[in-house]
């Protein structure tokens, strides 16, 4: 009984909770570490001694020791212990001040170990061994990152020759160890001799293998990349019926190779520029030397080189970093998954940027009309292509204006509706409790929900969404008198229209602007829509993409640029490149590209 | 700082846009009542008796996503005595829950009585308001407008608005009425080169087919021994059925005042002269045997040519009407498809139509004295200045006109029978 009583007591009376110390991420700690990161670069240049002083100062100021600094010291000590014998404290101090490859193998090893925080970092592999050159045994080590390298290639092309071939007699008078190794002992196709330690580290970070040999102040890096990647698949966002079905994948060289495979042009330049102070993401700036305008190429290069960020992951980020106007709704750089599209744009005199790790290649400059095109347009015969373009443009106009039009007509301009339809709308709206603005917003938001959920939903649940979306939001909303059936049609047509936008970014832009038009129409009817169109026109015509007016060649009108813009002429009439691109060579085919027609007449 | 400036600018625009306009004009569709016909009678307790036929969309479109509507319940009719149109609308809204919106008005009905007095004052009021559709049709009802509107009970369609639209464009294939849109009607009442007509309509007088009589037909005045299909005015047709109203013939206006009526046949000739004629099924006596009929499908082949010349003080009107016809029926069995006989048929048709046109024009000049056919419009181009034309006073001069009419008929197609063979009767 007493037990029961005390239990009851425990239930109803206040008991002081036990004190549990939980982990809390403190603000100043993280701030310190980030500022420490900043300091690190400069410290490396200044050397270890000054760094120790700094550490003391900073620790005095903030009273907290940074974890990174500590780890580094631990790493350094570890390496001292393992290396042991001939290293003293002075030597270890020199290591972090090193920038060039040292003649002493142990220095290099220590540097690498400190740099990669070994043994904390588990996927960095250092393999030490000896090689024999001209009878001399030389200690050597290679370093690479497990998982990023192809171990087979590493074994066959680096380790095996160094360890086995070096024992064979080398018929060469050259006694320089470095040269012998390069010329005879490393039968790999991409060997670079580097003297800067940072270059070696960059290469290792990008799936290379560093080879250090005792006694020479050079290191070798071999390209033994072997990371797993997606194979070349169909481009998911830009499907075509007629035309090549290859899409880019995440590997830079595969992507540049895909473009080069199509163009087969020695004037195609692929400049290497790396972006990101830490990530050093390799980007390839591609253009055709004797077509693309030099100043355009220089501008793109200037913008690429002027980016100061730590990490760059995707071309989507790069796009935001180099575009002209980040506040403009429409994208000013075209991102495409299709090598053939990039190739055809390069031949017009545009510039492409391929980013390592992104299946989307950026093409610039881009005009608004480019965003309406699909790669298929030029593969189809011109009557079909034109029909598609007209349909596409009207679909895009629908996706932008239809909800606004509906609001404007039903709330301001009832006289425009055919009487039969008017009565149908009125009858269906009779029991709907909301004004049409609220009604359309409900449905548009519902549709946007479905859309967003459709992208995020896990595959097995996909069919659930169809049921919820189609049945509940469509049929049940009408049955519950929350929306009128006509509105479902409006929202559906708008949705379908927005899927017909060939450029995904532009689709987003128009989805947002659509809401602006809904509100404009609700405040002032057609007047509001007209004002909206006017302002949007101003906005777009005043913007530029890499020095080219965004609405070219419509505003400003340029000479003879309309062969493949809104509509398309037959391919043999597209003799010139768009004038606004100011390409070095403006003509892309001879005046008579169908030469055989002339030959026919002669007979 | 610059960014905040931009943002505050945007906010200011948005606030002004919404606050100042405040959705001022915005009305939801279902917050309004849409009359489809508006009738004017002489009022008894006040100046004007106004009748509105208001659509009930729930009954028309069925609501609830289907169910089908009912033509009779699709409308409700309200009548009010009022000093003017707009005061009447206000009076109506004291008991109609929804605001009246006239933008879908299909028919404006004047009773004959009020049309005789003049409709200009009402026309002005209507034209001034943007809600009145310019393409609403003007109708003159021989009975009170209230009675006419109440009698409109469409059977073939659920939507009475559609009924008006289709019924009043039937002239394109009957030739018995015309297109009298409000805007054109108004312009013609104000014009000094052409005068207005309005469609004539009435409620049928016969309850059953036993009561049919052709006493009120116009065939006797035309010297016929039997009426043809065009020898009636609205309300006189020997017909019965659930559809109670008739639309046939025209009311002729001089300015805003009605001066006379035309029957169906005369309406056809009016259409031919004015140039609005499209096609019709045309019955005429067989030239070889007046006991039997020939039926042609007559169509316009070219635009009517009109010309006016002044002979002294009197205008002379020239008109040439170009028609073509398909043979629909030859009752007698004469072989008119034959190369020799076709010209004979053509000539007979020309003479028959010409006689009719002359009779109509005679009536137009001498009885009504109104140029509803647009000869004045033709002649206006001969004047250098507007003042000259105004002083010329065409509408008065028209009353002394002579005329010369030419009809050109081509028989084109005999239909599916290419050679008529008389019936063979065995002994």
Image (spheres, helix red, strand yellow):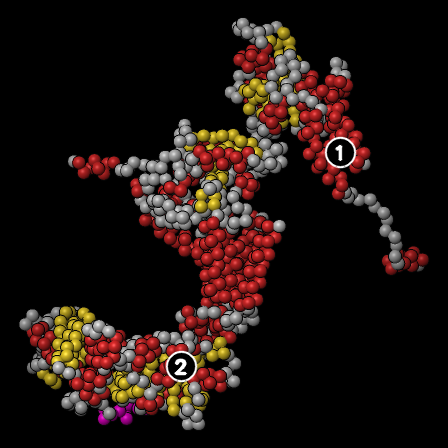
State the image quarter where residue B193 is shown.
bottom left
Q: Is residue B297 magenta?
A: no
Q: Nearer the viewer, residue B149 or B329?
A: B149
Q: Secondary structure at mark 1?
A: helix
- Mark 1 crowdedness (10 Å alpha carbons): few <14, some 14-19, many ≥20: some
Chain containing mark 2: B
Picture quarter with the C terminus of chain A? top left
Q: Residue furthest bottom?
A: B44
Residue B11 numbered mark, or none:
none
Chain containing mark 1: A
Helix, strand or loop for the magenta stretch, by majority: loop
For image coordinates 9% across by 83% down, the residue present is B289
Left or right: residue B4 versus residue A368 is: right
Look at mark 1 in the image and give the residue it sits on.
A67
- The magenta-colored residue range is B206-215
Look at mark 2 in the image and give the residue it sits on.
B125
Provide residue B276's location: percent of width, then percent of height.
Answer: 24, 74
Q: Nearer the viewer, residue B283 or B201?
A: B201
Q: Where is B308 relative to A257, above or below?
A: below
Residue depth check, mark 1 versus mark 2: number of the one nearer the observer: 2
- Mark 2 crowdedness (10 Å alpha carbons): few <14, some 14-19, many ≥20: few
Left or right: residue A388 versus residue A296 is: left
Provide residue A346's location: percent of width, then percent of height.
Answer: 42, 36
For image coordinates 58% across by 63% down, the residue present is B15
Provide residue B131's location: percent of width, then percent of height.
Answer: 42, 75
């Amino acid at each position: 009984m007493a037990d029961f009583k005390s239990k009851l007591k425990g239930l109803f009376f206040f008991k002081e909770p036990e004190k549990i110390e939980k982990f809390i991420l403190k603000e100043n700690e993280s701030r310190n570490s980030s500022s420490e990161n900043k300091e690190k670069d400069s410290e490396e240049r200044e050397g270890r001694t000054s760094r120790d002083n700094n550490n003391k100062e900073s620790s005095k100021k903030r009273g907290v020791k940074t974890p990174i600094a500590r780890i580094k010291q631990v790493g350094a000590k570890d390496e001292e212990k393992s290396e042991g014998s001939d290293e003293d404290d002075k030597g270890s101090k020199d290591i972090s001040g090193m920038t060039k490859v040292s003649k002493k193998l142990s220095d290099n090893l220590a540097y690498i170990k400190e740099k990669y925080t070994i043994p904390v970092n588990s996927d960095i592999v250092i393999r030490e061994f000896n090689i024999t050159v001209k009878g001399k045994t030389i200690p050597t080590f290679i370093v690479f990152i497990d998982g990023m390298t192809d171990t087979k290639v590493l074994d066959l092309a680096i380790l095996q020759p160094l360890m086995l071939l070096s024992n064979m007699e080398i018929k060469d008078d050259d006694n320089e160890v470095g040269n012998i190794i390069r010329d005879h002992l490393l039968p790999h196709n991409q060997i670079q001799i580097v003297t800067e330690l940072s270059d070696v580290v960059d290469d290792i970070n990008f799936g290379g293998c560093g080879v250090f040999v005792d006694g020479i102040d050079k290191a070798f890096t071999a390209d033994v990349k072997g990371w797993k990647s997606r194979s070349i698949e169909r481009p998911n966002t830009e499907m075509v019926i007629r035309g090549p079905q290859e899409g880019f994948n995440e590997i830079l060289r595969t992507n540049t190779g895909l473009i080069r495979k199509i163009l087969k042009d020695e004037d195609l330049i692929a400049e290497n520029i790396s972006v990101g102070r830490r990530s050093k993401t390799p980007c390839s700036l591609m253009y055709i030397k004797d077509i693309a305008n030099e100043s355009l190429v220089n501008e793109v290069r200037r913008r690429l080189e002027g980016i100061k960020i730590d990490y760059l992951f995707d071309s989507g980020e790069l796009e935001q970093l180099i575009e002209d106007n980040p506040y403009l709704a429409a994208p000013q750089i075209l991102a495409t998954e299709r090598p053939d599209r990039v190739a055809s744009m390069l031949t017009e005199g545009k510039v492409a940027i391929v980013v390592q790790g992104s299946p989307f290649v950026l093409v610039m400059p881009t005009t608004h009309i480019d965003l309406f095109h699909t790669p298929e347009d030029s593969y189809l015969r011109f009557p079909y292509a034109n029909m598609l373009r007209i349909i596409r443009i009207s679909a895009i106009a629908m996706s932008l204006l239809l909800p606004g039009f509906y609001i404007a007509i039903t709330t301001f301009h009832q006289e425009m509706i055919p009487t039969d339809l008017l009565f149908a709308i009125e009858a269906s709206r009779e029991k709907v409790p909301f004004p049409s603005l609220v009604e359309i917003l409900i449905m548009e938001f519902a549709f946007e929900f479905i859309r967003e959920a459709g992208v995020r939903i896990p595959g097995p649940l996909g069919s659930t969404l169809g049921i919820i979306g189609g049945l509940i939001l469509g049929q049940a909303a009408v049955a519950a008198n929350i929306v009128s059936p006509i509105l479902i049609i409006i929202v559906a047509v708008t949705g379908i229209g927005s899927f017909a936008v060939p450029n995904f970014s532009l689709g987003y832009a128009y989805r947002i602007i659509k809401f602006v038009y809904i509100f404009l129409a609700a405040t002032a009817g057609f007047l509001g829509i007209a004002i909206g169109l006017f302002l949007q026109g101003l906005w777009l015509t005043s913007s530029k993409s890499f020095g080219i007016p965004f609405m070219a060649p419509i505003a400003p009108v340029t000479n003879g640029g309309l062969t493949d813009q809104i509509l398309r002429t037959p391919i043999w009439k597209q003799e010139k490149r768009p004038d606004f691109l100011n390409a070095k060579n403006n003509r892309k085919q001879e005046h008579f590209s169908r030469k055989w027609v002339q030959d026919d007449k002669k007979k | 700082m610059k960014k905040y400036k931009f943002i505050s600018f945007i906010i200011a625009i948005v606030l002004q846009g919404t606050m100042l306009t405040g959705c001022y004009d915005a009305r939801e569709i279902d917050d309004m009542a849409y009359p489809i016909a508006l009738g004017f009678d002489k009022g008894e307790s006040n100046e004007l008796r106004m009748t509105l036929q208001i659509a009930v969309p729930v009954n028309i479109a069925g609501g609830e996503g289907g169910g089908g509507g009912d033509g009779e319940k699709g409308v409700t009719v309200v009548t009010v005595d009022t000093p003017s149109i707009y005061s009447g609308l206000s009076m109506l809204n004291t008991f109609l829950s929804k605001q009246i919106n006239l933008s879908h008005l299909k028919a404006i009905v004047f009773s004959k009585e009020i049309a005789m007095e003049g409709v200009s004052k009402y026309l002005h009021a209507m034209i001034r308001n943007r809600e009145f559709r310019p393409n609403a049709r003007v109708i003159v009802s021989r009975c009170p407008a209230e009675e006419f509107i109440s009698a409109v009970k469409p059977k073939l369609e659920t939507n009475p608005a559609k009924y008006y639209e289709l019924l009043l464009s039937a002239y394109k294939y009957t030739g018995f009425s015309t297109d009298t849109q409000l805007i054109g009607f108004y312009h013609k009442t104000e014009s000094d080169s052409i005068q207005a007509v309005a469609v004539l309509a009435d409620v049928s007088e016969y309850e059953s087919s036993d009561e049919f009589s052709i006493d009120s037909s116009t065939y006797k005045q035309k010297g016929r021994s039997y009426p043809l299909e065009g020898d009636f005015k609205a309300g006189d047709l020997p017909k019965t059925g659930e559809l109670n109203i008739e639309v046939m013939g025209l009311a002729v206006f001089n300015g805003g005042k009605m001066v006379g009526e035309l029957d169906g046949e005369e309406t056809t000739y009016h259409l031919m002269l004015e140039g609005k004629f499209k096609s019709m099924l045309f019955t005429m006596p067989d030239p070889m045997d007046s006991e039997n009929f020939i039926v042609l499908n007559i169509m316009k082949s070219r635009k009517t040519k009109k010309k006016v010349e002044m002979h002294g003080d009197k205008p002379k009107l020239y008109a040439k009407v170009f028609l073509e016809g398909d043979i629909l029926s030859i009752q007698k069995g004469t072989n008119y498809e034959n190369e020799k006989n076709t010209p004979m048929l053509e000539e007979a048709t020309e003479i028959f139509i010409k006689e009719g046109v002359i009779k109509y024009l005679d009536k137009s000049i001498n009885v009504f004295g109104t140029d509803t056919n647009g000869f004045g419009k033709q002649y206006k181009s001969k004047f250098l200045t507007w003042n000259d034309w105004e002083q010329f006073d065409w509408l008065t001069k028209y009353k002394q006109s002579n005329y010369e009419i030419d009809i050109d008929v081509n028989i084109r197609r005999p239909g599916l029978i290419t050679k008529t063979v008389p019936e063979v009767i065995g002994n």
